[in-house]
Image (cartoon, rainbow, N blue to C red):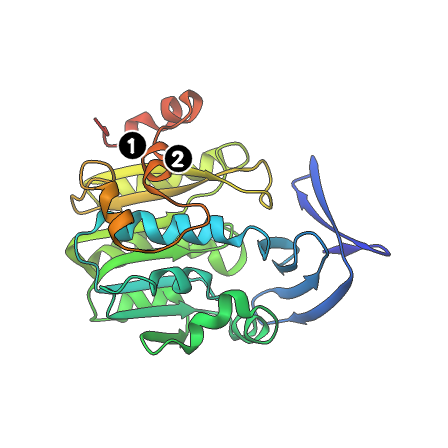
């Protein structure tokens, strides 16, 4: 994060900068893995940055966390055990734990500084750390999936961009181990970057998923805080289909209130722009 008098700046390559007007820096610490900062703004609320990249803002974090959690949890007929890799801000766990079928949610975060900073300054997301069904484990997610004997219905890879500590989370060995701890009808959803800025990484991720699981898809969402506005999640499963096995009536019957997600959004998110669909077509399972 570069800082002048009242602004912080996130750079995307050497061709784009996003600037945020800041009132004060609430937290700043270099962990063994990354620089972790939380700043306070008027419009966006508090912002979490890792290595100068915006991870979330209070203003629109619900978009990312709802779309990561609820899409697979409303496709799976009975999700009981959920694993989150990353997600140290707690927002994804917050959404997962709203589902009454979930009996346990294991969150594996490599950096305790992120967890502690969010506990102190971002209760909006970190509230999930106090939930009795949450099991928080501070360790490397790559090592966890390689060594665990637990089986999960849904695995959510809530990672940062493929740099620094998140780099191995975009590798074949990692996903082979994810599949090893996945239930027979399990689902894996991963943060899949931007179709504009990270097209080669999207291609690599889907190629890896296709080598590991029989059904692979991609869905999009939009928010204010990530460069370009349009970002993606990958959806891969042992066989459950993101549309054919989804019934929008479940979202209504759940009684849950959402700020972004709903049944229509769920279905529309899988309608990919032509330039994305055509590029990734060899690795996508037909949706109709």
Q: Looking at the picture, how far across and down is residue 17, in whole percent?
A: 71, 41
Answer few, some or many: residues within 10 Å of disc 1's Cα (few below 14, many 20 plus, some between 14 and 19).
Answer: many
Residue at 86%, 56% in the rendered image: 5
- The span from disc 1 to disc 2 (Cα, nearest Å) is 8 Å
Residue 174: image quadrant is bottom left
Residue nearest the observer in this picture, 161 or 41: 41
Residue 203: give its label: 2
**Quadrant location, the N terminus:** bottom right
Residue nearest the observer in this picture, 265 or 87: 265
Residue at 39%, 35% in the rendered image: 203
CB within 8 Å, label 1 to label 2: yes
Residue at the left extreme of this rendering: 184
Q: Secondary structure at mark 1?
A: helix
Residue 96: image quadrant is bottom left
Q: Is residue 211 visible?
A: no
Does label 1 or label 2 sit earlier along the sequence?
A: 2
271 sits left or right of 63 in the view: left
Answer few, some or many: residues within 10 Å of disc 2's Cα (few below 14, many 20 plus, some between 14 and 19).
Answer: some
Q: Looking at the picture, how far across and down is residue 115, in whole percent?
A: 52, 72
Residue at 62%, 66% in the rendered image: 36
37 sits left or right of 107 in the view: right
Q: Looking at the picture, how far across and down is residue 116, in whole percent?
A: 55, 76
Q: Disc 1 designates what residue?
A: 283
Residue 90: give its label: none
Q: Secondary structure at mark 2?
A: helix
Q: Is residue 269 visible?
A: yes
78 sits left or right of 225 in the view: left
Q: Looking at the picture, how far across and down is residue 55, in whole percent?
A: 56, 55
**Quadrant location, the C terminus:** top left
């Amino acid at each position: 994060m570069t800082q002048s008098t009242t602004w912080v700046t996130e750079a995307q390559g050497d061709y784009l900068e996003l600037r945020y007007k800041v009132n004060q820096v609430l937290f700043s610490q270099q962990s063994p893995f990354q620089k972790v900062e939380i700043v306070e703004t008027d419009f966006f609320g508090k912002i979490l940055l890792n290595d100068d990249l915006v991870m979330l803002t209070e203003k629109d974090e619900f978009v990312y966390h709802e779309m990561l959690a609820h899409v697979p949890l409303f496709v799976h007929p009975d999700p009981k055990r959920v694993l989150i890799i990353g997600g140290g801000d707690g927002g994804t766990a917050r959404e997962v734990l709203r589902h009454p079928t979930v009996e346990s949610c294991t969150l594996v975060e490599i950096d305790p500084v992120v967890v502690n900073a969010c506990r102190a300054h971002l209760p909006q997301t970190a509230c999930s750390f106090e939930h009795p069904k949450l099991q928080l484990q501070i360790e490397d997610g790559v090592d966890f999936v390689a060594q665990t004997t637990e089986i999960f219905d849904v695995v959510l890879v809530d990672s940062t961009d493929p740099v620094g500590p998140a780099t191995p989370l975009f590798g074949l060995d990692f996903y082979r181990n994810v599949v090893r701890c996945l239930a027979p009808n399990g689902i894996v959803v991963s943060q899949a970057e931007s179709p504009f800025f990270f097209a080669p990484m999207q291609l690599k991720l889907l190629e890896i998923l296709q080598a590991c699981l029989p059904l692979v898809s991609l869905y999009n969402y939009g928010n204010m805080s990530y460069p370009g506005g349009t970002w993606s999640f990958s959806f891969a499963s042992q066989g459950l289909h993101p549309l054919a096995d989804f019934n929008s009536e479940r979202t209504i019957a759940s009684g849950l209130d959402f700020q972004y997600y709903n049944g229509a959004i769920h279905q529309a998110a899988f309608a990919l722009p032509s330039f994305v669909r055509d590029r990734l077509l060899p690795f996508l399972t037909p949706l109709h």
